[in-house]
Amino acid sequence: MTNLTKQKLGDFAKVKGGKRLPNGFLVQNDKTEHPYIRVTDMKFSGLDTSDIKYVPDEAYGKISRYTISSNDVYISNAGTVGFTGKIPEYLSGANLTENSAKITELNKSLINQDYLIYFLRSHEGQFQIKSRVGGSSQPKLALNKIETIEVPKLSVSQQAQIATVLLNYDDLIENDGKRIKILEDMAQRLYTEWFVNFKFPGHEKVKIVDSPLGKMPDGWEVKKIEDVCSKITDGSHWSPKTVDAGYPMASVKDMNNWGFDIEPCRKISEADYAKLVKNDCKPKIDDVLIAKDGSYLKHVFIVNKEIDLVILSSIAILRPNDKLLPELLRLYLLEPNIKSRMTSYVSGAALPRIILDSFRKFPIIVPLLSVQQQFNNIISSTIKLRNSLLDTNNRSVRIRDLLIPQLVTGKREIC
C-alpha cells in the first residue's frame, strides 16, 4: 500500500466552530441538560469527562446552535491545538467551546469516523495540523485550514478494519483503566476510614483531642506541608525549543490520574534536557506530582519508576521526607475536602494556580509513623497490583501508538 492517493477532509465532511461562554455562566453539576465541552476536557487519547461543566438554562439560548453529536469528530483549534476524538453517546448534543471545532456531516461512503480520529492523532495527522497553525500570541487553526488536511484514500472497508484493530487496543486500555480505578478507590476509602474518620485499628483506646484543624487522635500532629517534604518545587519556568525527535517535556495537560501521556508531550533536545535535569526538573521515584495550574489537584500521582522526562512549571514536585510516607501524602491530597480548603492558597480567576510559597505553609494532620506503616503494609499488595496493571496498560498504549502511524497511512496491511 504505497503511493496512496489522498483526499482532502473538506471533500467528505464539513467543519464548524464552537461558541465561547464566559466561565461565570458555567455550573459544576448536572442540574441542567446542557453539558459544555472545553479544551480542558480533552486529552490526546480522548475526552476526560471527570470535570464536565454545564450551561444554565438561562444562558443556553445564546449558544444552543453550537452543539456536537456523537457522530461528529471534535478537534481543538486554539491554544492547545490538535486534540481529536468523539464524545460519548450520553453527551451527544453537548455545547462546544469556541477553542475547538467539529468535523461534521461525514460522508460514510468515503470516511470511517474512528479511522479519521486515529489518522488525525497519528504523526502524519498531527504534522499536518501543526503545519497549518497560525497566530503569534495564541496558536490558532482556522476552520478552512482544517478542511485542507489530506487523508489517505483507503476504501471504507479498509478503514473499518484498521479502526477495529486500534479500537480493540483502546478497549483493552480502558478495561485495565477501570481495574486500576477500582484499586485506587479501595485505597482511598481505606485512607478515609483511617485518617479522616479515625477508625484505624486500636482507635478505641486512643483519646481524641482538639487541634487547629479540628479533632484528631492524641499523639498525631498538625504540621505544614514543608515540614513533611524535603523539597517542594515546580518544573521549569523556561520553555526550550521544540524539536522533532528528543526527550519528552510534560505540562499539566499531559498528566492523567496515574502518570503521563507520553505521546503528546513535546520533545526537546538532549542538551536542553540535560540542563533541566541538572535544575531538578526531572521527577524522581517516590516524588508526588500534582497538577498546579488550571484544574489544580485534578491529577495527583506518585512516580513509581525511573522515567526520562522533564516537566514544566504547571506541575509541582513534592518530595516527602521520613515524617510522611509518599502514599499517605498522595491520598491526603486526593481527599475531596482538601481542594476546597486550598482556595486561599490559589491565585488567578481565568487560570487558577497553586502559589507554592503559600502552599508550603498549608497545614495537614500527620499520623503517628507506626500507624502510617501499618496502613502501608495493608495496602502494599493493592498498590503493587495497581502498578503492575499500569505497566501492562502502558505497554498496550505503546503498541497501539506504534501501530497507528503504520496502519492509518497504509504502510502496514492487516493480515
Image: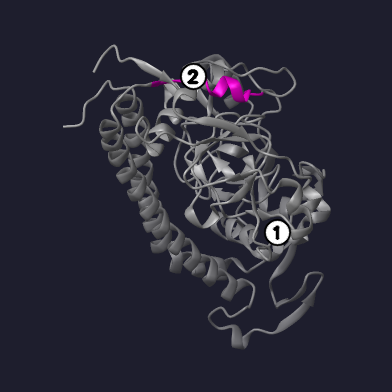
Identify residue for label 1: 28
Give the structural element (helix, strand or loop) at label 2.
Answer: helix
Q: Report the amino acid beneath label 1.
A: Gln
Q: Position of residue 123 (x, y in %)?
A: 43, 23
Three-letter code for the amino acid on which mark 2 is drawn: Phe
Q: How many marks?
A: 2
Q: Does the segment drawn in magenta span residue 147?
A: yes
**Magenta region:** 140-151
Q: Indicate which disc, 2 or 1, sits on the residue closer to the N terminus.
A: 1
Residue at the image position 65 percent from the left and 56 percent from the top? 34
Q: CA distance from mark 2 to mark 1?
A: 35 Å
The image quadrant where one finds the N terminus is top left
User: Can residue 365 be seen at all in this image of the molecule?
Assistant: no
Foreground residue among 60 and 287: 60
Horizontal relation, residue 71 to residue 357: left or right: left
304 on left or right of 359: left
> What percent of the width, then of the height, locates residue 388?
35, 51
- Marks 2,1: beta carbons within 8 A: no
Residue at image coords 30%, 45%: 168
Circle 1 packing at 10 Å, graded few (<14), some (14-19), many (20+), is few
Give residue 141's position: percent from left, percent from top: 62, 23
The disc label shown at residue 127, or none: 2
